[in-house]
Image (cartoon, rainbow, N blue to C red):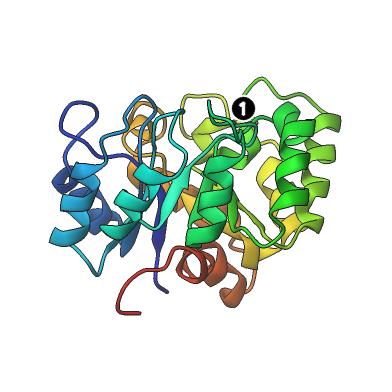
Amino acid sequence: MTIVDTHCHAGLNKYEPIESLLYHMECSGADKAVLIQHAGTTDNSYHVECLRAYPDRLSAAMIVETTDTGEKMRHWAAQGIVGIRLGVDSRADAADPLAQWRTAAELDLVVSAPARPSTLLGEAFAEVLRTFPDLQIVIEHLGGIGTEAEPPYDEFKQALALAKYPNLTIKLPGFGEFCKLPYPFEHVPPLARMVVDAFGPQRVMWGSDYPPVSSREGYDSSLKFPMEYFSDLSQTDREWIFGRTALSVWKFKNL
């Protein structure tokens, strides 16, 4: 099984350099990773350096200024960045509020999309889905559901109905994002199972959220626990969740 971590952060001024991530990946058995630019940073040059240093192991998503109408996106894409991070309700501060979504579709970028159940259900995202039906959009962090979620999870269930859109996939995070600490978790709500049931294994991808995960269950457990949780699934289904879905979406080199 090829294991791909689809939600990692690396940097020199915030978080940690790429070597720290690679160390944890090697210790835990993860083979490849997607670098997601952290909020507040529009200089993606370190990601470009990482891609050039480890071309077989990494893919990356940029962030650009809200005023960008596509020029910066084209600049970073030309240097090898294959995705952009846009909130599901994101709009550009420009004459065309959809300029960044439009450029992503033009360049065939992958959109890594922070969300909450409420924004997934909002008109802003509905407009994106209507306008760009072929744009690959990856919903981050299990749709933004957290430890405050309570049964019967009505809003979350409504958001999961968006699985009817074939261009959507969703990230399965370390369970510490929605299970109350400490680890090992005493109670695991059925949220991850609900996501896999709604989207199917071929549209779910694991992502650790390194390095913030270090303050929750830790990197190794962020992989080990969901793999054990889904041990009842077939080997093929687990291969999709923990690697093959990501490989089909994130355009890694030399596959």
Residue that lies at the very extreme toward the front in this rendered image: 95
Task: Residue at 43%, 35% (x, y): give it.
Answer: 68
Is 199 left or right of 223, judged from the image as shown? right
Quarter of the image for residue 119 reads top right
Is 239 left or right of 139, judged from the image as shown? left
Quarter of the image for residue 199 reads bottom right
Q: Measured from the top left, where is residue 146 in percent x and y?
A: 62, 27
How many marks the image carries: the answer is: 1
**Picture quarter with the C terminus:** bottom left
The crowd level at tag 1 (other Cα within 10 Å; few <14, some 14-19, many 20+) is some
Quarter of the image for residue 180 reads top right
Residue that lies at the very extreme toward the top in this rendered image: 148
Is 166 left or right of 101, judged from the image as shown? right
**Picture quarter with the N terminus:** bottom left
Q: Measured from the top left, where is residue 136 in percent x and y?
A: 59, 58
Task: Residue at 81%, 57% (x, y): give it.
Answer: 164
Please give the residue where the numbered disc 1 appears in the rendered image. Answer: 146
Q: Is residue 3 above or below residue 152?
A: below
Q: Nearer the viewer, residue 134 or 232?
A: 134
Q: Is residue 232 visible?
A: no
Q: Is residue 24 above or below residue 121?
A: below
Q: Measured from the top left, where is residue 195 in percent x and y?
A: 71, 49
Is 74 left or right of 24, judged from the image as shown? right
Q: Nearer the viewer, residue 204 or 187?
A: 204
Q: Amino acid at mark 1?
A: Gly
Q: Nearer the viewer, residue 208 or 38?
A: 38
Task: Residue at 76%, 24% (x, y): give it.
Answer: 150
Q: Measured from the top left, where is residue 161 in percent x and y?
A: 83, 48
SS of the residue under disc 1: loop
Q: Is residue 78 visible?
A: yes
